[in-house]
Image (cartoon, helix red, strand yellow):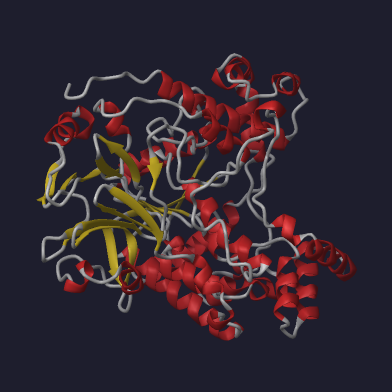
């Protein structure tokens, strides 16, 4: 993700946006240095001129961020095809990919499109009749254009449906333009439409049913996209966790001759040690690996890393990792942070019987083979897989609903809570197979992990595995191919089997941070008590304070309950950050 500041103000084609809005943003001390990128015809765009962007040759807009040609994966920098500014956005997204916002004027309308990966943030506010889109919504508050006002209903939704990301944010007046969505402003009206959806690629006509073809397509898409991103930077910092996904990213970086600094984090005592796998991958690829250890003392629960964001999507326990990463990047002169983030989501990581149900519903031969694969994967009997599949198949309609987490929340506060609205990918066509529904929705979940990182202020954070071509390819592959031989992410494993050491390719275990999170919890128990029992969430009646108080007694909380309590503390810290934020006057 790249958070270089951009502000696009849209008025009517025959009326420029009020100058005072642009002036207020430009005078904001935290917003400097900003340059007017384009103006006239009803649009003013202000941004960091040193950030990646491409101006259309006809002057009717620009692309903010990094954009690649779909056929060659070459970066589009100077030689801009004139069709970029005239193609329907649906055609645009077929010909290009990357991490970008496309801002265009078409006739009397202005159009803004956010690429499907969501690699560039995009928030919207309406001020004095002007539509404002920005990558940095905090500047609107710091310039005095909006005042922070928490919508407690939306905030409650974020606690119950934490992995979902609706368009409305808990700050009134600020919404998010969702990935794959185009917003058109015309005649004083703002209209949204979904220009790209993952469900298009799950249709039977688009399925890749051959395991060999699936392997080839995943290899091509992954090497093309990761390689394209790698060529944009001189000295990336790569975190190799020891898992499959980050190892695949490392393999492609080695293939294209990149020169990354590589680090991994040692596990806390009691958590699975991934260091041997990370070292095996690094040694195999010829990279030097530095092992770091997160220090619990670097975690400040009262400080929200989402303090500048309109939703509480940061996790305090990650602060210790952020501190180490930023220090190493500064030492190495790194110009980007690379990771395997999103790999589980893209590469069809499933540990349920859904692949069995998918194959049964599709009427595809080989059902028994998939049942055997899932039995091996889950380490249970074939009979257990059969009974689970039958039970799950008959209650699948209820399972299409998004999973709610009401743990430690007050029943009265959430009893009549409406379901969050506004994410275009939540509802899939009725014919979508159950496993594919979960696979597609996993890309919504990853969007909550792209922001709230302090290192974004140092350099872009690149998660190349969530690139659009990779996602499209993976969505077209049936779920039962992803679990062949009883291995999760089986297609990706086959694709890179000759480029990574066997111990990484054949690894079945996953890393975990339970002990580390428990250390954070135990070191901050008194602060957690004060924040949750005497904070804003409790005053609003959103918390089950009786149960929370009981869980704060030594040895009372399970590992899952500790994580939930830390989640609630993250939200409380976010509330405090916004409620204590200075309120400037516009133009000061």
User: From the viewer's perspective, is 206 left or right of 180?
Assistant: right
| Residue 86 higher or lower than 156, as above or below | below
Evaluate whether residue 275 shows in this view: yes
| Residue at screen point 38% across, 69% down | 225
Work out whether residue 72 or residue 235 is closer to the camera in this orientation and state it.
72
| Residue 280 appears in the rendering | no
Which of the two residues, 19 or 247, is positioned nearer the viewer here?
19
Instruction: Find residue 117 and report its horizontal and vertical position in percent.
Output: 42, 59
Residue that appears at 16% across and 41% down: 17
Q: Position of residue 170 (x, y in %)?
A: 47, 34
Q: Is residue 317 left or right of residue 329?
A: right
Q: Residue at x 53, y 30 (%)?
A: 570
- Which percent across, then down, holds residue 100? 31, 57
Q: Quadrant of residue 410?
A: top right
Q: Position of residue 214 (x, y in %)?
A: 55, 80
Q: Is 462 located above or below residue 437 in the figure?
A: above
Q: Residue 250 lies in what quarter of the image? A: bottom left
Q: Quadrant of the C terminus?
A: top left
């Amino acid at each position: 993700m790249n958070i270089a500041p951009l502000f696009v103000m849209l008025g009517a084609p025959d009326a420029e946006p009020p100058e005072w809005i642009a002036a207020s943003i430009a005078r904001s001390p935290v917003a400097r240095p900003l340059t007017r990128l384009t103006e006239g015809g009803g649009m003013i765009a202000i941004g960091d001129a040193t950030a990646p962007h491409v101006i259309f040759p006809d002057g009717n807009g620009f692309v903010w961020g990094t954009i690649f040609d779909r056929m060659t994966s070459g970066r589009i920098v100077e030689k801009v095809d004139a069709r970029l500014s005239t193609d329907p956005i649906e055609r645009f997204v077929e010909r290009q990919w990357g991490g970008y916002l496309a801002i265009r004027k078409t006739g009397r309308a202005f159009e803004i499109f956010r690429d499907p990966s969501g690699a560039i943030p995009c928030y919207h506010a309406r001020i004095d009749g002007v539509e404002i889109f920005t990558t940095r919504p905090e500047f609107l508050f710091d310039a005095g254009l909006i005042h922070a006002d928490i919508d407690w209903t939306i905030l409650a939704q974020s606690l119950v449906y934490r992995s979902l990301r609706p368009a409305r944010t808990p700050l009134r007046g600020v919404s998010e333009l969702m990935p794959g969505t185009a917003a058109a402003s015309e005649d004083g009206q703002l209209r949204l439409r979904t220009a790209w959806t993952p469900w298009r690629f799950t249709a039977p006509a688009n399925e890749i049913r051959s395991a060999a073809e699936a392997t080839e397509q995943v290899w091509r898409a992954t090497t093309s996209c990761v390689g394209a991103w790698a060529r944009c930077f001189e000295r990336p910092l790569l975190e190799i966790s020891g898992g499959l996904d980050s190892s695949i990213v490392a393999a492609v970086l080695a293939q294209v001759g990149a020169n990354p600094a590589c680090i991994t984090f040692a596990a806390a005592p009691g958590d699975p040690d991934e260091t041997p796998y990370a070292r095996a991958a690094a040694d195999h690829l010829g990279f030097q690996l530095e092992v770091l250890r997160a220090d619990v003392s670097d975690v400040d629960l009262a400080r929200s890393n989402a303090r500048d964001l309109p939703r509480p999507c940061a996790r305090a326990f990650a602060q210790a990792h952020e501190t180490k990463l930023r220090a190493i990047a500064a030492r190495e002169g790194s110009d980007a942070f690379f990771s395997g983030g999103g790999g589980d989501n893209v590469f069809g990581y499933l540990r349920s019987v859904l692949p069995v149900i998918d194959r049964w519903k599709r009427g595809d031969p080989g059902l028994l083979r998939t049942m055997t694969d899932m039995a091996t994967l889950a380490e249970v009997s074939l009979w257990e897989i059969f009974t689970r599949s039958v039970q799950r198949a008959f209650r699948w309609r209820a399972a299409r609903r998004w999973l709610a987490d009401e743990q430690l929340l007050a029943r009265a506060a959430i009893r009549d809570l409406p379901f969050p609205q506004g994410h275009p990918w939540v509802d899939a066509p009725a014919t979508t197979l159950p496993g594919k529904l979960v696979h597609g929705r996993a890309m919504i979940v990853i969007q909550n992990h792209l922001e709230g990182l302090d290192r974004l202020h140092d350099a872009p954070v690149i998660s190349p595995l969530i690139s659009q071509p990779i996602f499209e390819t993976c969505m077209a592959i049936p779920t039962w191919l992803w679990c062949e031989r009883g291995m999760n992410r089986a297609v990706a494993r086959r694709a890179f089997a000759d480029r990574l050491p066997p111990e990484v390719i054949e690894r079945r275990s996953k890393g975990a941070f339970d002990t580390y999170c428990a250390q954070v919890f135990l070191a901050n128990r008194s602060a957690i008590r004060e924040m949750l029992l005497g904070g804003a969430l409790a005053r609003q009646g959103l918390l089950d304070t009786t149960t929370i108080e009981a869980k704060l007694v030594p040895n009372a909380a399970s590992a899952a309950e500790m994580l939930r309590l830390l989640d609630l503390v993250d939200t409380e810290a976010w509330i405090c950050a916004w409620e204590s934020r200075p309120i400037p006057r516009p133009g000061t």
